[in-house]
Image (cartoon, rainbow, N blue to C red):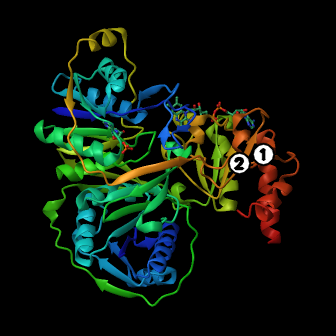
Amino acid sequence: MKILVCISNVPDTTTKVTFTDNNSQFNINGVQFILNPYDEIALAKAIELTDNGNGTVTVINIGEANAEPTIRKALAIGAHDAVRINGNPKDAWFVACQLAHYIKENEFDLILTGRESIDYNGSKIASMLGELLSIPSISIVKKLTIDSGIAHLEREIEGGIESLSVPLPIVLGASEGVAEPKIPNMRGIMAARTKPLTVVESIEVESYTEIINFETPTPRGQVKLINADDTNQLIGLLHNEAKVI
Amino acid sequence: MSVLLYVEHSEGKFKKSTFELVSYASEIAVRNQTTLTAISIGNVENEELFTLGKYGVDKILNVNSSNLRNFNNQAFASVIAEVVNKLGSDLIILSSTFSGRGLAPRIAAKLRAGLADNVVSLPNQADGKFIIKNMAFSGKAIANVEIKSTIKVISLSANSYKVVENNKPIEIEDFISKVKDADFSSIINEIVRSTDKVSLPDAEIVVSGGRGLKGSENWVMLEELADLLGAALACSKPVSDAGWRPHNEHVGQTGISVSPNLYIAVGISGAIQHLAGISSSKVIVVINRDPDAPFFKVADYGIVGDAFEVIPKLINAVKEYKASA
Ligand SMILES: Cc1cc2nc3c(=O)[nH]c(=O)nc-3n(C[C@H](O)[C@H](O)[C@H](O)COP(=O)(O)OP(=O)(O)OC[C@H]3O[C@@H](n4cnc5c(N)ncnc54)[C@H](O)[C@@H]3O)c2cc1C
Ligand SMILES: Nc1ncnc2c1ncn2[C@@H]1O[C@H](COP(=O)(O)O)[C@@H](O)[C@H]1O
């Protein structure tokens, strides 16, 4: 089985989000970039599925050279090879078109993404890619097994879980529960240095959206502290002042 | 501008997020002096469809063929695209629910349309442009996004627009789609709904517990509080990791994001990854025995105290309030 794991390079979860150039650009100054946590889950699952030696795991990133430490990390965790499509991943459509172009030329049985990237939280890539490839796409997958070319999985729905069976090829957005993230060991880190990382140029894509600028949400005022014995006062405030009950 | 609205239902019933969506779309239709057409896919009784007239829908296309009873983003995207092409719609509006977020990108990709998701405002259409606000960076920022394509797709975040009544006579028309079974291949084996209680993503009030509650047995009091308030339950990640609560209740960076009107956090420290999932809540109440817990910095109201003493008192206060209301 040939598996492709799409990985994104995102600001560390504890990053303080600020902007530059009249609030039009995310300020990457001093920001630590990491492998998107959901992509770690997708990658761990892909490695698990090919553990018995039948199959390969390729990781792919649409990004610039500064994404390479994250790609190497994915190789250290256990991917067999990596591809970087050189370009600025400016929106989901751009990324999905690059991925689709690559996948059409290099077939895969299973394409895994994370449920969402933790920066723009789009949750868009898996579905766009499924559409561009005319194959099923399921997001927020919580469980996955593969048996004779059929994926048996569970996806999260509002207030419940749906279990499905879908023939491969398929695009899945992995979420918590699919696998436990793997930590690279020393052997993996050494091996990652010599594993193949191919760089290809991106294709032209028409852009349909543009971020004009960012705003930061208005900070909440000072917290109003209420005495632990005055729970009635809290209820009163929630009713009369905040008007939420 | 011609607006098409996809109205999502759950087992044949519309939920609050759909009424918010209709109210929102109705305002856009009014501003653009156009009518509002909605499409419903699956088995929804006419009686239920009629309720949408109350919020401003002029016409509903009802797609209820047996092969389209269950949600399937691939098939549903084909049906919606078929309708868009037939009606010449140029703005398609959906809810940012789990299903909506799996569907909107497929529609956008199919129609070569620009997509904004997690939208939290009406569009700014000044100077013939279309600029809209959406949440980004796990609630730490809002992006102003311009959609430049002729056809536009947007998905509205829950609890970001008030339900407004705008009674209209509504017309229901059955629509037979040309989509064939061969266009989609997934088979649904089973759907398990967690409970008949309020579902977390669309709850208006959420009561959430953290490691400070010490063990699953102590959720009895949170459950009682939640029941009294008509709230959904949530928890921090370590709580679901420890198996005290199911994973679908875990909110935050790696769980679900919620934006209720009221979020009550009990025994949760307020780590940045937790805040990522709840920071767009309108009002936040924090109950924690540590006055230096980071959560107090982002709270509107706080009680410094032991949850095991405060929660029973709070339950009594809610009971008194309800008795007097
Ligand atoms: C990549 C990554 C992703 C993560 N994603 C998430 C996520 O999605 N969601 C999430 O929640 N966490 C997430 N975390 C974990 C997060 O960093 C915190 O560890 C976690 O939120 C802490 O949970 P907690 O507040 O319940 O526990 P603690 O941090 O242990 O806090 C317990 C709190 O309870 C208070 N307390 C104790 N006893 C009482 C009492 N009797 N009465 C009142 N208060 C009491 C304490 O003062 C303390 O503030 C993530 C971490 C990483 C690295
Ligand atoms: N630049 C990128 N390169 C490769 N894969 C990506 C990129 N951006 C996002 N993805 C994948 O798409 C998933 C969902 O991202 P998003 O749609 O941005 O929330 C991520 O978890 C990744 O698996």
Labelled disc at residue A195: none
Q: Amino acid at mark 1?
A: Val
Q: Is residue A9 above or below residue B180?
A: above
Residue A168 sits in quarter:
top left
Ligand 1, seen in the image, is in the quarter at: top right
For residue B63, side relative to residue B311 (left or right): left
Real-space CA distance between mark 1 and mark 2, rounded to the nearest whole angstrom? 8 Å
User: Taking B6 as reference, is B85 left or right?
Assistant: left
Q: Is mark 2 within 8 Å of ligand 1?
A: no
Q: Chain of mark 2?
A: A
Callout 1–callout 2 Cβ contact below 8 Å:
yes
Q: Nearer the viewer, residue B244 or B66?
A: B66
Q: How far across and how far down the image is residue B159, in percent?
A: 56, 61
Q: What amino acid is found at the position of numbered circle 2 in the picture?
A: Arg
Q: Is residue B304 above or below residue A192?
A: below
Mark 2 crowdedness (10 Å alpha carbons): few <14, some 14-19, many ≥20: some
Side of A135 where B9 appears, left or right: right
Residue A201 in the image: state x and y as whole percent. 20, 32
Q: Which residue is mark 1?
A: A223
For label 1, the SS is loop
* Location of residue A45 in the rendering, given as x and y in whole percent from the top left corner: 31, 31
Q: Residue at x 53, y 43 (%)?
A: A23
Q: Compared with residue B4, is residue B95 higher up or lower down, i.e. above or below? A: above
Chain of the residue under the numbered disc 1 shown in the image = A
The quarter of the rendered structure image containing the C terminus of chain B is bottom right
Residue B6 appears left or right of B278: left
Residue A220 is labelled as 2
Q: In the orientation shown, which residue stands out farthest toward the bottom? A: B169
